[in-house]
Image (spheres, coloured by chain):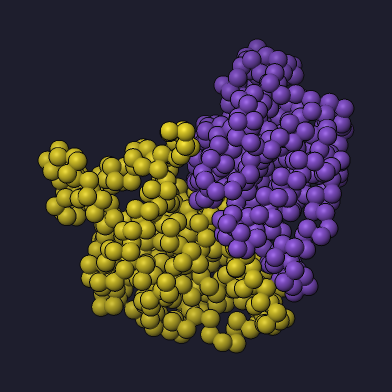
Chain colours: A purple, B yellow
Amino acid sequence: MLKTMLKIGLALVVAGPLWLGGAAAQQSDPLPSWNDGPAKRSIIEFVTTVTREGSPDFVAPADRLAVFDNDGTLWPEQPMYVQLAFALDRIKALAPMNPDWKDRQPFKAALEGDLRTLASGGNRAIADLVTASHAGMTSSQFTAIVTAWLASARHPRFGTPYTDLAYQPMREVLAYLGANGFTTAIVSGGGLEFMRPWTERVYGVAKERVIGSTIKTRFEMRDGRPELFRLPEVDFVDDGPGKPVGIDRQMGARPIAAFGNSDGDLQMLQWTTMSGGRRLGVIVHHTDGEREFAYDRASPFGHLDKALDAAAANRWTVVDMKRDWKTIFAPVKP
Amino acid sequence: MLKTMLKIGLALVVAGPLWLGGAAAQQSDPLPSWNDGPAKRSIIEFVTTVTREGSPDFVAPADRLAVFDNDGTLWPEQPMYVQLAFALDRIKALAPMNPDWKDRQPFKAALEGDLRTLASGGNRAIADLVTASHAGMTSSQFTAIVTAWLASARHPRFGTPYTDLAYQPMREVLAYLGANGFTTAIVSGGGLEFMRPWTERVYGVAKERVIGSTIKTRFEMRDGRPELFRLPEVDFVDDGPGKPVGIDRQMGARPIAAFGNSDGDLQMLQWTTMSGGRRLGVIVHHTDGEREFAYDRASPFGHLDKALDAAAANRWTVVDMKRDWKTIFAPVKP
């Protein structure tokens, strides 16, 4: 944190009053990976308006909270959620100690890589896989497992580490908002502890600004050492109507900007944008089957149906990935 | 937040490299409301050691998390928890709409101000009072109710607003740690939403660094407006073994310093201090019946028994309020 403060301190000294007014940011292009178009313009116009002192839409820095879904909004969620790929690898690794899994669903489907059967099992099947693969160790052991997996796992189509697939245009939006006094937070249906080990490095979002689904943990003294143990029991599902609940609990504030890509983000977008005042709602629409993936209403992962209709009714910005993004991927510095 | 950044920016420019090394803070007294003694010295020595680059006990700023209990550690909890006083006032205000309360426990005791009966009802009675008095409205309505109550309520003995009773020596510790690159967080058994409206002003601790007990909330569209409604159901009890769980979930990190005053802080202190490396555990011991209150093993509020024994066994610092604190109260600027 001190390092960040120092950087900010230096930035203030160097940039001076220009930076303070937000004017400097507009002289060079803050979103170089975006093509000119209504999506890019709506983001810049929103930021310019709410940060201009004296504007009737001015929002004080303390109230500038912007929230981002993760899967499908900040990185790909096809051919399956990254965390599901992690869970399947964990299930495979644990299978020798659980011989009954090869005949028991959803473990059988997981071991066979049968995504169709897994998807048809719905949230129940996912919960079974998650509790079996994410529990039974301490919090710090789980962090080590996630970190090791991310270092070796590769995306099945792109062949790169998953963390290299963070969308460059969205990383620019995160940085642009941060430079304009916004607090940014990630609000994922995925697991809190699956994300925290890497969000700061990849997105510049610190651990305490990550919100996600959780399983229960329990404090225990074992062999005279106090530890938190991960239990095979779902605690909180940070999806759909859970997202506003999770944001309120973690941040204690209602956002003024929200970025999502699926029906799981609908209530977060509603809660953010339908609260009076100038607000920004953004939906990332996956339209680029060539450079990424093309899907919406029929997809088992990242299903976008009601939220797409709501976008039109509520004048949310819909990002057409194919048209609006000049670059999609750019490797993240280690 | 921008304001804070600006202040930090200015502080860096003014203080220069002296500040960076932490040396400046040691030239003037960072804890002027503390008398010289082992308690004050242990805090300053800890901070000096973990912030000295090159020291074997050096801790990087990103890992400098310090956590503070609230009731009895940062402000008084006698003759009852402040939030209980709030709940009793709410129960009285709601009583005309709930005529059965005058014959039903724990409401009868609440209306009669019968603390002994309330205390004998244990956590169950407290939970009943809290759900009856803290639910049934939106999150923002509840914030308004708390804010209005704090503006008018007065401590029964001192006759001042409760927020003027924040312990000045502890506010100095919070500021001292903040100036030395620490992230500070409040970890209270009390209600999250009861604290967030005022912790920044009183303690300099922002909403997202407050951890507390919660009741469930639900997202709902009512009359076309999205709101979070507070439900009469306990969600999470941030006390005892719940405190490490709450810290881990909210901050994603294990603290290196913990401040508490009762058995409800025992596990937080254990988890913080028994993890290898140089750590600081502090217990505020209420020994000053003249200027504040004197109590420990026999008190229904702020019961300090096992944690006092553990303090000796684990070499935690025990603050003797009477001996160690020069000043206890100093009005907080509005």
- Judging depth in this view, the residue of A235 and A237 nearest the camera is A237
The quarter holding residue A89 reads top right
Count of numbered tags = 0
Which residue, as the protein is rendered here, is positioned at the far top?
A: A103
Q: Residue B86: in sight, yes or no?
A: yes
Which residue, as the protein is rendered here, is positioned at the far left?
A: B103
Q: Residue A96: in sight, yes or no?
A: no
- Judging depth in this view, the residue of A244 and A133 nearest the camera is A244
Q: Quadrant of the C terminus of chain B?
A: bottom left
Identity of the residue drawn at 19% across and 41% down = B97
The quarter holding residue B113 reads bottom left
Instruction: Give left or right: position of B115 versus A151.
Output: left
Identity of the residue drawn at 63% across and 55% down = A50
Q: Is residue A220 above or below residue A316?
A: below
Q: Is residue A86 above or below residue B204?
A: above
The quarter holding residue B153 reads bottom left
Whole-percent x, y for residue B305 in the image: 34, 60
Q: Quadrant of the N terminus of chain B?
A: bottom right
Identity of the residue drawn at 22% across and 50% down = B93
Q: Is residue B151 above or below residue B124?
A: below
Whole-percent x, y for residue B332 in the image: 41, 74
Whole-percent x, y for residue A19 in the image: 74, 66
Identity of the residue drawn at 61% across and 76% down = B48
Whole-percent x, y for residue B35 in the image: 43, 84
